[in-house]
Amino acid sequence: MKSLLIACAVIFMSCASTSTQKSSAVQENTELLVSESQGGAEAPGFKIIKDETDFRTIIKGSFGIADLGNESYIKYPQFPKNKKVVLYNLGTFRSGSHKIEEIKSISVKNQILYVEVPAGEPSGGMEIQVISSPWFIFTVPADYKFTSVELKYSK
């Protein structure tokens, strides 16, 4: 009985360490910097953010701040110097939450950047119809070359 418990503990520990390695590998390649449920463009699309000034302007604009000197309550993430920073607009939705909370993986194939994100949970029942334009900003390695971005939804 004691050896069975030890065997189960070893199997459990090996599974736990494998998932940690996978998430740290994704973390090295990409990082979700900002994700909002409102303020994006009406059509899906992406833009590469070149510098910190552009980065801050995009974040300020999403909050609708009129007095640009009075935004001390916004916590800006650090602008990465050694990675490409990508703004992606998901388009317009009529109901449900489409805010991106996590990036599972990224890859480039045929100059298309594939971004894998968790699929949204169906809410079930009637929803109040609210129009939203979600967007998010994330990083990719500086050497990635792509001309378009596609989201892949997974469980």
Image: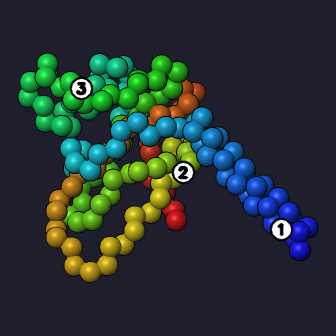
Residue 113 position in % (x across, y down): 51, 43
**What's the distance in space between the residues labelled 1 and 3, CA to CA?**
56 Å
Q: Give the residue type at disc 2.
A: Lys
Residue 124 relative to residue 17: left or right? left
Q: Earlier in the sequence, mark 2 or mark 3?
A: 3
Percent x, y of residue 152: 49, 57
- Label 1 or label 3, whichever comes before in sequence order: 1
Question: Does dot 3 land on a helix, a strand or a loop?
Answer: helix
- Say if 133 sits above or below 122 in the image: above
Question: Given the image, on which type of amino acid does mark 1 rest?
Answer: Leu
Give me the residue at 28% from left, 25% from top. 56
Q: Which residue is mark 2?
A: 104
Q: Which residue bears the numbered disc 1?
A: 5
Relative to 53, say whether 147 is above or below.
Answer: below
Are the residues tagged 2 and 3 within 8 Å (C-beta)?
A: no
Say which residue label 3 marks: 57
For residue 41, say whether it is visible.
no
Q: Earlier in the sequence, mark 2 or mark 1?
A: 1
Asked if residue 80 shows in the view, the reply is: yes
User: Residue 65 lies in what quarter of the image?
Assistant: top left
Q: Is residue 20 left or right of residue 136?
A: right
Please name whichever residue, 21 or 150, is drawn nearer the observer in this view of the structure.
21
Q: Residue furthest right?
A: 3
The crowding category of the residue bearing disc 1, from other C-alpha atoms within 10 Å (few below 14, some 14 to 19, many at least 20), is few
Camera-side residue: 72 or 145? 72
Q: Residue placed farthest to the front in the image?
A: 2
